[in-house]
Amino acid sequence: MSNTTVRFVDVQHMIRWTAEQGVEQIIAGIVGYLEDDFRRWPCFDKTPRVGSHSDVGVIELMPTSDGVEYSFKYVNGHPSNPQSGFQTVTAFGVLSNVATGYPTFWTEMTLLTALRTAATSAMAAKHLARSDARTLALIGTGTQSEFQALGMRSALGIDTLRIWDTDPQAMEKFVRNAAPLGFDIHVASSALDAVTGADVVTTCTADKTNATILTADMLDVMAPGVHINAIGGDCPGKTELDAAILTRGDVFVEFPEQTFIEGEIQQMPRDFPITELWEVISDRATGRTAADQITIFDSVGFAVEDFAALRYVRDAVEGTEFYETVDLIADPDDPKNLFGLVTDAALVAV
């Protein structure tokens, strides 16, 4: 019988590993893996995520492969879950060996998705935002917000936060968590107040609606050359930006075939001009070209990002105490005699 045990990082291992390593350091590490994978973007199998939508949310599979390893993430998005004490987003992910099809690594991805989403935002800002950006406006202070703030500090040195949420308790939670981390935090009275003077604006709201979190006139109060990091649009019928904003700046996306379905650009015609982020990172296209240029990252999350995050965690925990092994694959000595496992067990039982 071959060795078919799978390394498994459960929730408690992920929590302990993250606490020991530090969120900001992990995000920076994932950024490195993301950049490596975005530079070899053409080698990946790519398909829009497979979604099962309902009136209350969505359950999705996000697969990809580089020909050597295969990964998928199972993820849900249910905006009303917190009202019942459940998370809006939960996930787990798997890495497999393409040569055999056998899974090799399995991990929780509720916490890891927050880390990789912040890392993706940080990577985009690193390549698109002004290098002197120091003020971040966060519109939405839910599950993603603290990770997003730390990601932007890792990438740009952000030290000032302006926050707004329609839920006062969410803002209070954010201040409790983020103030000890060394940020200067302004609790805004409105979205307009929050974005005033901001160098970077991140929208991360959860409502599954075609909302208008930012209107085009708000661009006039933001800092010149603002970078907008729109990460809340992640399914058909859910947007955060006034469509007019998209025509005022340069729009960068992950995978157009998915972003036109789920992102801000679902509001635009299919010939709307966009640039794929991987092209900027691999120096095949230009990103920011002027200090006063408005850049917009229309992010919906893509499977290659999960692939990079899974690889990072697998490599980072190797040889540590932060994983266990599970016997996940039935693997008889004679690969043609799966039934023999049952008969052998019956004999032992007798």
Image (tube, grey):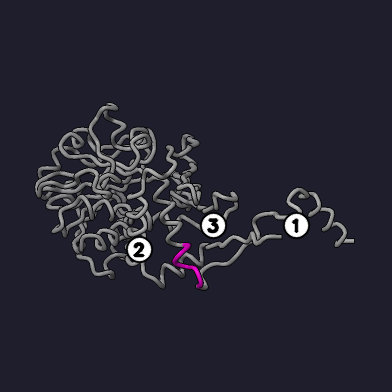
Q: Position of residue 113 (x, y in %)?
A: 41, 54
**Which residue is drawn at the image coordinates 50% and 36% (left, top)?**
52
The residue tagged 3 is 106
Kindly tell me whether residue 139 is visible in this rendering.
no
Which one is earlier in the sequence, the residue at label 2 or at label 1?
2
Residue 320: x and y in percent read 50, 73
Q: Is residue 325 left or right of residue 320?
A: right
Whether pointer 2 and pointer 1 mark residues with C-beta atoms closer than 8 Å, the reply is: no
Q: Which mark is residue 333?
A: 1
What amino acid is labelled 2 in the image? Gly
Mark 2 is surrounded, within 10 Å at the Cα level, by few (under 14), some (14 to 19) or many (20 or more) other residues, namely some
Helix, strand, or loop for circle 3?
A: strand
Instruction: Give me the residue at 29% from left, 27% from top.
Output: 270
Residue 32 visible in the picture = yes
The residue type indicated by label 3 comes to Trp
In the image, the segment drawn in magenta is: 314-319
Against 133, residue 41 (above or below) is: above
The mark found on residue 29 in the picture is: 2
Circle on res. 154: none
Quarter holding the C terminus is bottom right
The percent position of residue 85, horizontal first and vertical second, equals: 47, 53
Report the amino acid beneath label 1.
Asp
